[in-house]
Amino acid sequence: MVEPLLTPVKPPFWNNPQVRAITFQVIALVATVAFGLYLFENTQDNLRRLGIASGFGFLSSPSGFDIIQSLIPYSAASSYGQVFWVALLNTLLVASLGVVLATLLGFIIGIARLSKNWLIAKLALAYIETFRNIPLLLQIFFWYFAVLRAAPAPRQSLSLGDTVFLNIRGLYLPAPEFQAGFGWVLAALGVAAGLVVFLVRWSRRRQAATGQQFPIFLASLALLLGLPLLTFTLAGAPLHWQIPELQGFNFRGGWVVIPEMASLLLALTLYTAAFIAEIVRAGIQAVSHGQTEASFSLGFNTGLTLRLIILPQALRVIVPPLTNQYLNLTKNSSLAAAIGYPDLVSAFAGTVLNQTGQAIECIAITMAVYLTISLLISLLMNLYNRRVALVER
Amino acid sequence: MKLRNILTATATVTLLLSGVAQAGTTLDAIKKNGFIKCGVSDGLPGFSYADAKGNYNGIDVDVCRAVAAAVFGDSTKVKFTPLTAKERLTALQSGEIDVLSRNTTWTSSRDSAQGLNFTGVTYYDGQGFLVNKKLGVKSAKQLDGATVCVQAGTTTELNLSDYFRANKLKLTPISYDKSDESAKSLEAGRCDVLTSDQSQLYAQRIKLAKPDDYMVLPEVISKEPLGPVVRHGDDDWFDIVKWTLFVMVNAEELGINSKNVEDMKKSTNPDVKRLLGVEGDKGKDFGLANDWMAVVIKQVGNYGEIFDRNVGKGSELKIERGLNALWNQGGLQYAPPVR
């Protein structure tokens, strides 16, 4: 008997996994594009039918309203486009200050939470549980309507040496006015910074070679303060302070931190710091206790152990969730609208949208901006994460 | 505030997706729903204000009730949506509400670029300033350097900047979403001045803890004709809302009110007969019941009645008729004839 030859049967093409995969992806892509086109066409139709203006031409027309806080020159004669920049800068200002302050506070509280001192540890615990369990919006209201409203009227301002004033309209600080010759002071600061970098490298090399330590912190501090100060005196003190003065209804001159900004920043910082503290605690606890014991047995004290052994290893665990907190803080800053701080959502997606009636354009721009900011933060934090991550060789 | 953002976002998405839903006329959709979706203010005594039981009262509220009476013959068939100044126009554009009756100023850009149609004027107003008497300010010209509380997204915000610019005064504005926040800030001293339409200032003042400590400055810096608004593009609905208001004004002029409307049906005056649907079929021309105008007057009242009841001498606000008197009594309220 002859066995029939077993020839492999070619399966029909619709059973070919590759063909299937590609087909379904093409279908999905076509469907998505078609839906997008439908949305676009439908929107255009609706806008035309309702007689609503569309396009981005409105960005160059004059806004006609004033904004309480602006980091760039702005007046009611400026364009809606400028409102966008003013609002964006206000958002970035409160978000970046918030990120820095929340990180500092979060690390301190997180470490305090692990302190062997019972009182410190419990205080940190109480802080964390209080601030992260109360809705952020309520905290903003608390600072704005309860705490900062207790400040006195302008005429009864609390003053510090008649240069710094605190009242219900804000915190008034003297503003520096740079005179000719201040450039030298800045140059001196640059030189000092350069010297410090050099000094740090030198002391590291020396310590590696000889084991001798150098009081690098004090020396750097002396350089950074001393050199610019010396230049400042030699150049004839080229700096004036513009002191805020009570004129009519309000203080004028100087810098002012408005209560809207202060309460938003306070609430964002305290709220986010509570989360960061827990992340820091988790990160530290993720480092095996054996590391601490090994460090102690080598003669490091607690501070050095924390700085040189624990934190560098903990950062690997800390950085990714920390990125999330930075993103949250930035997005939460949009709650500004609740207390009249002119951020992107309040001034642009709110007032401009309302004055022009161009909802789609304003919302689209605002969403694109938040997306861009968030992606940028992620990018930066991922770069940093790559540096601190465990390098496996 | 999250909620508010969601509201704006939904409104925007509705603008993207709607089309099929909007295909029919507004009136058909309303009849199918069984009620009118009416946007009102988030709390302004005299104009739209929910009492302790949650019942809305006010001149703007009564306009909505009158439209419901016109369409359904029943003034209670209204669903009220409280809106902030910022939300109101988007809510109307996107079809979340059928008519906006929320002390909104009639302007050229709202009529044109924003795709809206104002149906008339329920209240002729003008912008003013409310200050604490302690400041010793007697005129708005003395407000150089003052901090001013204002509601965000209003014509008020624009007039304020214009006025300070024109008079070369320095301005620090704080714009809040809600008028309540402005009032609280004025009381706390966060701002020196609260600016808004004068009618609103009087309404805000009675909400303050010590109303007598505050005064309204004499200057009126703008024209603020306030009225109901509908979406652009549905002429039939526009006509119904517009004529509901005209009917109430005409009724006052003809001496018809909610109490005597049945008796007036026996009147020999042809104007009265036409308006009440006794003679001719003027009501049917709107696609409504022939006697809808009479129903409006019976259930809600004529213009004078709703004015007195809500903001005038029968109310806490005690605002004079002034510009809002009938044209033949020295005011501006004038309606085309029913004919």
Image: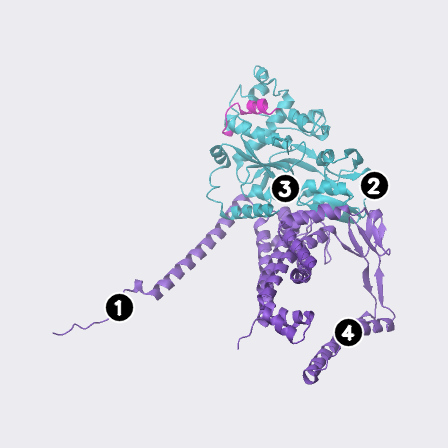
Chain colours: A purple, B cyan
Disc 4 and disc 3: Cα gap in Å?
57 Å
Disc 3 and disc 1: Cα gap in Å?
68 Å
N-terminal-most mark, 2 or 3: 3
Q: Which residues are magenta?
A: B286-301
The residue singled out by tag 1 in the image is A10
Chain ID for label 4? A
Q: Are marks 2 and 4 in contact (CB under 8 Å)?
A: no
Specify whether disc 3 shares its chain with disc 1: no
Amino acid at pointer 4:
Leu
Specify whether disc 2 shares its chain with disc 3: yes
The x, y position of residue B34, in whole percent, is 49, 32
Q: Secondary structure at mark 3?
A: loop
Disc 2 and disc 4: Cα gap in Å?
54 Å
Q: Secondary structure at mark 2?
A: helix
Amino acid at pointer 1:
Lys
Q: Is residue B261 left or right of residue A173?
A: left
- Residue drawn where x is 62% and y is 62% of the image: A281
The residue singled out by tag 4 in the image is A218
From the viewer's side, name the closer residue of B223 and B268.
B223
Q: Answer few, some or many: residues within 10 Å of disc 2's Cα (few below 14, many 20 plus, some between 14 and 19).
A: few
Q: Answer few, some or many: residues within 10 Å of disc 1's Cα (few below 14, many 20 plus, some between 14 and 19).
A: few
Q: Is residue A112 magenta?
A: no
Specify whether disc 1 shares its chain with disc 2: no
